[in-house]
Amino acid sequence: MRIEIEKNRKTPLVRFTVHVPTGRQRFGFPGWLLDKRHLKRRQLLERLFIELEDALNSGQSLPESAWESLATLKEDYPKVHAKVVQKLGIQEPPAKDRLTVGKAFDDYIADHYTNRITISNWKQTRKKVVSRFPEDTPMEDISLKDMEKLFFQLREKYSVATLYKDVRNVRQLWDHCHDNGDLSQNIMRKLRFQAKSKQLVARKPYVDAAWFAAALEAITSQQQRTLLCYYRWMGARQNDPRGDKWEDVDWAGKRVLRSNIKDDLEKLGWCPIPPQMLVELEKWHQLVVNEHGKASGPIFPWLFQSSSANQYTYFVGRVKQKGVAVWDDFFNSLRASRAREIRRLPNGRQLEARWIGHSPEVADKHYDDIQESDYGLISDDQETPPDDEPGKQSDAA
């Protein structure tokens, strides 16, 4: 195998020449292939043509690495690939059952996940992919370029943060299938989704006590008032309280054994009930006892009687009717507001992980930013003790 450079033309040409039983064959590529920035690509082509020449002259079958390089050649230079197959008489290996994109997603989800939220997120990724590639499309027929085009088009419908996670899922799925031998190569390892760091985090407004109090006055039903306080002062996700029962409340200790829907309503542990929340919870408890003789079972049965969407509509509609500004990311902003407050307490970062229910790393990225009160820590006059006199030893020494 020889490499020749043809310079007597406007655009230089790199030719790979192989000598096979059918004679000398030459295949041309753009001259920029010689640039050191494209060294890996040039080395791949050199190895491919050496393997082709050796296999055809010896009568042996092509090694697996040659088939992978041919697939890359087909992706990058389809016309040259067609010429190589024709001129060298390359015979594709016998076809085996080809894994389809629908089956790949379904099998991977079923084999790896049990948490219903994680399963739901993966199914959303699946939905986006099969919107462009039908379920029976063999995975090997999906090119990197087509997948990149799909996610670029999806920017019009979905947030950057959502698509970034979907791209990560696609790479993870293709990695798994390649490692299992279902794919001869993994072209999706190069799949990237360009996004700035700030685009991956939804900034949530801080709903201070006064703003929240004004919104709370718009809610007249005691159950819903208490629930709204649960979101703000306990930092609960919208459906976390579905797992909390009256039996989980320790009235003497002013705490509740809170649940976490992210872990299939597994209990977070004992969480303190703030006074703003406790006063509403006591009122709601008394109403339940007056009506049923005792309080048992779910604290908020309304969560089981209406959909999540209708709950959102209920709260937002009544707050708007009272002329109170409605904050963005209604439920999540209440959670984030409480998380910010807790992490500013002594040992707050650890308490936030225990009482809000997300890791410190997630909280650092998604639930915190500069608060108005933080500015005073630096800008207000601070009395600082004078430095020790040079050379003077302290009493503790």
Image (cartoon, rainbow, N blue to C red):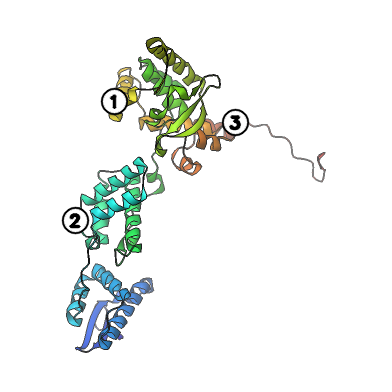
In the image: residue 371, left or right of residue 89: right
Indicate whether 245 appears above or below 187: above
Residue 149 in view in this figure: no
Near mark 1 (Cα within 10 A), the count class, few <14, some 14-19 or many ≥20, is few
CA distance for labels 1 and 3: 49 Å
- Residue 238 occupies which quadrant of the picture? top left
Which residue is most to the top? Answer: 290
* Amino acid type shown at disc 2: Asp
CA distance for labels 3 and 2: 65 Å
Q: Nearer the viewer, mark 3 or mark 2?
A: 2
Dot 2: element: loop
Residue under circle 3?
A: 380
In the image: residue 328, left or right of residue 361: left
Near mark 3 (Cα within 10 A), the count class, few <14, some 14-19 or many ≥20, is few
* Amino acid type shown at disc 3: Asp
Residue 347 in percent (x, y) is at 59, 35
